[in-house]
Structures are given as structure tokens and as C-alpha cells.
Image: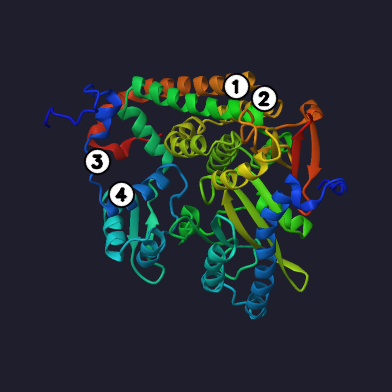
Amino acid sequence: MSTRRAAPRSGRPTRLHSAVFQPIGDEGRAALVQRRVAEAIMSGVLAAGERLPAETELAAAFGVAPATAREALLALRERGLIVTRRGRSGGSFIADSADPVRFATRTLLDGSRVSLRDAAQHYLALTSACVELAAQRADVSEIAMIRTRLERISDHDLAAWRMAADDAVIELAALSQSARLTREQMKLQGEFSPLLALVDTDPASRVESRAHLLEVLRAVGSGDADGAARALRDNTRFAVDWLIAYREQHIGIISLATTSPERIRP
Amino acid sequence: MKIHPAPPASYTTAEHPVEIVREYFARAIDALADWKDALAVEIAPLRRSASLTTSRLDELVEPSALRLFDTVDLPVYGSGFIAALDSLADASSHLAWWQGPERAQLVLAAQSVNKEHIDYSELEWYRVPFATGEPHVAGPYVDYLCSDEYTITVAAPVHIDGEFVGAVALDLLIDRVERDLTPRLAVFGNDISIVNGVGRVLLSTSPARATGDTIRGDDLAGFERFACPGMALDVLIARA
């Protein structure tokens, strides 16, 4: 790359200034469609066995040409995320092996402790900002509604519990009354949720996660911004400790992971 | 819902902040009132023959939803019909919704892939018109389902033979409402705020009051409070 950069009139290019002129990723539309579906699978929004809409329907939904949708489906199939069955009840289905927990395990084992801690810190910083604002701004009735919905879901069913917990966090974020923070939270929740789902495969952890989340809600509901941030910090620390312990325990099979990732079992 | 006291007779309607606010949102409520009647007539035969599907509903709603953008004198950001839960032949829920500068149809990720997943029964713009049978100005709230923006949704219930079949609604972005109303209210004073049913500030002529904050409890003592007739909004005017 050329070292010459467009400089502002002051003649001193700032760091932010040079960031403007970084190359733009030349991702095609098919790649975007592929990424959107892959993220939905990895975050558990699309569950194993679920049927994807037909190619034409998918194309219409995403506003792309059918050929683009086909290309994306092909790539998803090659990555083993979907399977295609022929015949009358055929179509594309989310592969059984494409489950978020297994994906999270792979991410955890392939990554490092430092990357995990960094991701957790990012998640904590954003979520804390949201709940602190929510604690100032939310009405008790709004918190009560989130709480009621959460209490309706038992933590016996991992997938249902994770979905309810993610929803509760997004709803809390929205109570910050900040559109920008809420959008960021939605993006980050999708990335971080698979790791939280891995923690929650342990029924004892699920009890702990639920207690933490209810404590965050209680604190926000009573206008206690510090208490909400503290509960969130405790929960993140708990999750990170659990994940690191899990990683240490499973790191032995990391050599296997590089040759045959399918053999990792959470 | 709380009962709104009648506005005091001490002011002449045309020159009071309450009237400005009421008239502004009444444009939406009135437009939705006309639309809901027309739509009910179109939907009724399809319901009787049990052939009301999401795609038939989309076809039916689209022309009038798009027309609303141009016929209402408001910065409409989104418009459409939200079906009552479990009222369609092929899905448990559906939003026939158009929004944004392109007025593009909303396709929710969950809607395109699994039509069963969206439960909007507890969201204010659905819950209140459903429960009260009356139009409602919902928000301000961060709309993480449709616009992803800080939004006000005005919604009116649609009934066929006394049965709730859904709601027609339109979205306004606070960003635009602020620019429309703040200068008009500023003429009357430098600490006038519009708040909703939970005391959340929609906008204020005081630069010190942030939209999204709440004014309630003891803080209310410093204000004279005027209810906007026909909507759950109050105008707070700081006491001199």
C-alpha cells in the first residue's frame, strides 16, 4: 500500500483521518446474504433442523437476485451450515451440526484467553452504559414487563432460555432511550450470545445467569445505576471464569480441532 | 389508563401550546381513523372466506400505506397494518409495513425465515389500542423491531363486527418531531416540555432537558401540567 495519505489542511493526518482511507471490504451481495444467515445460525436465531425459505422467497426477502441467493446457499452448504434434501418435503435445512454451542466451543478453543477477555470487556462496557442510562430513565412498569416475560421461561430449555435472556438484554438496552446504543447492543449480543449459551449448557450456570439478570432488572427498576452495573460485572466475570476453566479443560483436543473440528464435543 | 382533566377554560385554544401539540398528533389520529374504516371493509370478505394470508394482506395494505406518506401533513417515516395475533390463515403474526426514505417493505429476519417468532402483543403500539379500543400515541421509544430509531408510533385499532383484527399505524422519528414542534412551542416559553404517560420527555424547549429523561414525582411541582385531549400526552410549563 502507498504510504502517501490524503492529509487534512492542517497537514497533520490524525489517526481517525487515516482510518477514513482504509480499503473498503469488497464483499459481494452473496457474501452479505451468506453472513447474515450464518450469524443467525451461530447465534441460535435459526435452530438446527429449521427449514430455510425457498431460493426465490429468500431472494425476495433480502432484495437480491435469485442467482445471488443461490450462490449464498451454495456457500452455506459448503461450510456445512445447511443441508439440502431432495424430494417433495425437500429444501434447505439448518444442519444438525451447525449449532451455536458447538460453534462457540470452536471459537473458544481456536481463540486465545486474551481475545476472550477483550470480547467480554467490550460487551460489559456497552451493556453497562445501556443499563446505567436505563436505570435513570426506565419506568417501573417497563421493567416489570421484561421481568414477567423472563419469568415465564423456565431455564430447563437451553435454547428458549438463551433467546429470552437475549431479548431481555435488548429490551433493557432500548430502555436507555438511545437508538445508537441499542443498535450496537443488538450487534454485540449476536456475537457474544453463543459464548453465553456455552456457559449456560451447565444447568448450575443457568441458575446463576438468571439470578444475575434478575438482579440487573431489580437494580434498574429501582433506579440503582451502580447496582445494575455491579450485577452485570459479576455476571460477566462469572461467564469469563467459566469459559476459561472450560477452555483449559478442553485445550487438550485443540490439536485434534485443527485436523478434524467435527470431533470436538461440547 | 389515566383520566385526563379537561383543559382549563382560561386560554383560547388557538394560542396555547397544548393546542399545537394536540393538533399535530391529531393529524395522524384522524388519518388513521379514515384508513382503518376503509381497510376494515376490504379485509372483511377475505376473513369470512378464511383466505386472509400474509401475501393477500400485503397486497391489500400496500397502496393505502404508501398513500399515507403523501397525504398526511407529517414527516411519516413508516406506515402499515399490524395483524392481530393468530388472525391470519398462514402465520401467527405479521406486520404489513413500509418504511424509510425508500418506503421499502419491512422484512424482519425472523419474519422471512420463521413466521412464528414475532410476538408483539406486549409492545405499546399494539397492546394499548388492543386493550382500550382507542387510538394511541405510543413512545417515544427505541424501535428495535422496525425503524431501529427513536420513534413515536401512532396506532389505531381496526375492528370488524366488534372483533379486533389488528391496528393501522404510522411512525414518526423524534428527530423530525423535535424540529417541527420545538420552535413553535419556544414562542410560549423556554421551559415547556411534552411528556408521555410515564413522564418521559418527548421534547422540550429547554436545552437542559434531554429527550428520553423523565420528569415525575417531586420534580413535577415546578410545572403547570396540561393534558392533551384524546392522547396520553401532557404539556408541562415551568411556573414563573
Label 2 resides on the chain identified as: A
Q: Position of residue B236 (x, y in %)?
A: 75, 37
Q: Say if residue A214 shows up in the picture.
A: no
**Whether label 4 touches label 2, CB < 8 Å:** no
Residue type marked 1:
Ala
> Do discs 4 and 1 share a chain?
yes
Label 1 resides on the chain identified as: A
In-front residue for pair B58/B72 = B72
Residue picked out by circle 4: A80
- Quarter of the rendering containing residue B54: bottom right
Residue type marked 3:
Ile
Q: CA distance from mark 2 to mark 3?
A: 42 Å
Residue type marked 2:
Ala
Residue at point 80% right, 38% down? B225
> Do discs 3 and 4 share a chain?
yes
The numbered disc on residue A257 is none
Q: Quadrant of the C terminus of chain B?
A: top right
Of callouts 4 and 2, the N-terminal one: 4
Dot 3 lies on which element? loop
Residue at point 65% right, 80% down? B45
Badge 1: residue crowd in 10 Å (few <14, some 14–19, many ≥20): many
